[in-house]
Image: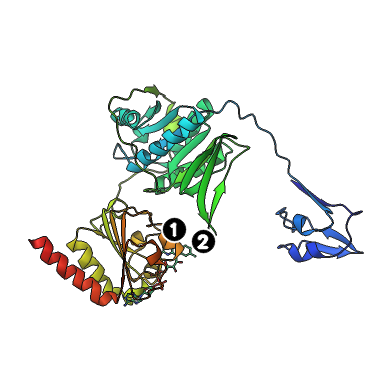
Amino acid sequence: MSIKVILEKCTGCKLCVKTCPFGAITVVDRKAIIDFAKCNLCGACVPACKFVAIELKKDVKKRDLSGYKDVWVFCEQKKSKIQSVAWELLGKGRELADKLRVNLCAVVLGDHIEKEAYEAIYRGSDIVYLVENPGLLHYQDEPYTKVLVNLINEYKPEVILCGATTIGRSLVSRVAVNVYAGLTADCTGLEIDEKEKLLLQTRPAFGGNIMATIITPNHRPQMATVRHKVMQEASPDKKRKGKIIRKTYDGNTFLSRTKFLDFIKEIEETVNLAEADIIVSGGRGLGAPENFKLIRELAVTIGGAVGASRSAVDAGWIPYSHQVGQTGKTVCPKIYIACGISGQIQHLIGMQSSDIIVAINKDPDAPIFKVATYGIVADLFQVVPSLTKRFKEVLKK
Ligand SMILES: Cc1cc2nc3c(=O)[nH]c(=O)nc-3n(C[C@H](O)[C@H](O)[C@H](O)COP(=O)(O)OP(=O)(O)OC[C@H]3O[C@@H](n4cnc5c(N)ncnc54)[C@H](O)[C@@H]3O)c2cc1C
């Protein structure tokens, strides 16, 4: 990219000086001068100039994108079992592939994991790229990145989807750099622009206040990570047929500078928040860490997991692993009970697709009531213990 001032058009009005966030423009002898040591080519000055005296040139190298086809889903596995986020992505991937009239392909990496490759076919894949090696038994950045990059360079997919999980985030950012592609992280919506054949990648931006739709017109593959529980899982159909393409690579591909020792599960809670059918969440309205026991009691009584707002986590009342929302977990339980949570957009993003939302808040104008199926305007210190008591009575019968 390059930027220049067209001196004949510049009147020295200083509008550009006020607009430049980097203080890179000064006016000398009624002409704007750009300090290239400070300018980062953001382009803010271009529309600010009423006299069209600043020109920003983008040298977009046209790459040949014609050889790229098919929608790929990276199927994350743990203990040789593909994780449910992959089934969600195959459900969405099928829709996208059908709109593009291309194949839906799954990438399955692991050791002795062929059975799971068939499962990926039952869940909608036309083709499964299967790489089996002891070096792929557990996720490790280096071998997984090398294998996925090799596959991409050979087969050239036009779209790659991956779960926005700890593994997915670690893997595809590395892969994107290696294949010179961009990456839209944490998407909550994916569609196809059928005219341009582009992937429309929607994600919250600016602290969740707006939804941004991002396109990748000049590079391939178009890569996106998608949060768990945002898309519907593809149902298995054991009659589906597909092709498995097995790939082998030399030993160097599987080398890693890190060594997998053990996987240690967080022992704090017994119920996995992302998988729970019922979640009882507490927010700042609880007032003190010890009051989370009310939330825990209700959760235990009805077989649910404990969630929390970021305020409760930031206050140190409960560990981060319980946080629901934009910077926490996305959840989609059958019942979500929000206690003393105001319902700011960053929290809603993580739970608003729950089937039933029960909100308990003493402020009738709290935004949580806008998404609630049932709203209880009351003091949580009265309502929550009463609910626990009543559930205990009913469930005993
Ligand atoms: C970039 C960014 C990312 C963020 N990510 C997240 C995220 O992942 N998750 C998240 O939750 N937040 C997130 N936040 C913070 C978010 O904006 C809110 O600040 C936060 O969700 C508020 O938490 P809260 O509802 O517990 O607290 P508050 O907004 O303070 O609400 C407390 C509520 O409790 C009610 N209350 C008080 N006492 C009682 C009582 N006795 N009985 C009943 N109700 C009572 C009040 O009426 C109030 O509505 C993020 C913010 C930013 C900027």
Query: Which image quadrant for residue 198?
Result: top right
The residue type indicated by label 1 comes to: Gln
Quarter the C terminus occupies = bottom left
User: How crowded is the residue under tag 1: few (<14 C-alpha within 10 Å), some, or many (20+)?
Assistant: many
Does the residue tagged 2 have its C-beta within 8 Å of any atom of ligand 1?
Answer: yes
Does the residue tagged 1 have its C-beta within 8 Å of any atom of ligand 1?
Answer: yes
Numbered tag placed on residue 273 in the rendering: none
Query: Which image quadrant for residue 285?
Result: bottom left
Residue at image point 24% right, 55% down: 271
Q: Position of residue 19 (x, y in %)?
A: 74, 63
Q: Position of residue 115 (x, y in %)?
A: 28, 29
Residue 255 visible in rendering: no
Where ligand 1 lies, by image quadrant?
bottom left
Numbered tag placed on residue 207 in the rendering: 2
The answer to whether 231 is drawn above or below residue 10 in the figure is: above
User: How crowded is the residue under tag 2: few (<14 C-alpha within 10 Å), some, or many (20+)?
Assistant: few
Q: Position of residue 128 (x, y in %)?
A: 39, 27
Q: Position of residue 158 (x, y in %)?
A: 53, 32
* Mark 1 vs 2: CB contact within 8 A: yes
Residue 282 visible in rendering: yes
Query: Which image quadrant for residue 288?
Result: bottom left
Name the secondary structure under disc 2: loop
Name the secondary structure under disc 1: loop
Quarter the N terminus occupies = top right
Q: How many discs mark residues in the rendered view?
A: 2
The residue type indicated by label 2 comes to: Gly
Residue to which mark 1 is pinned: 326
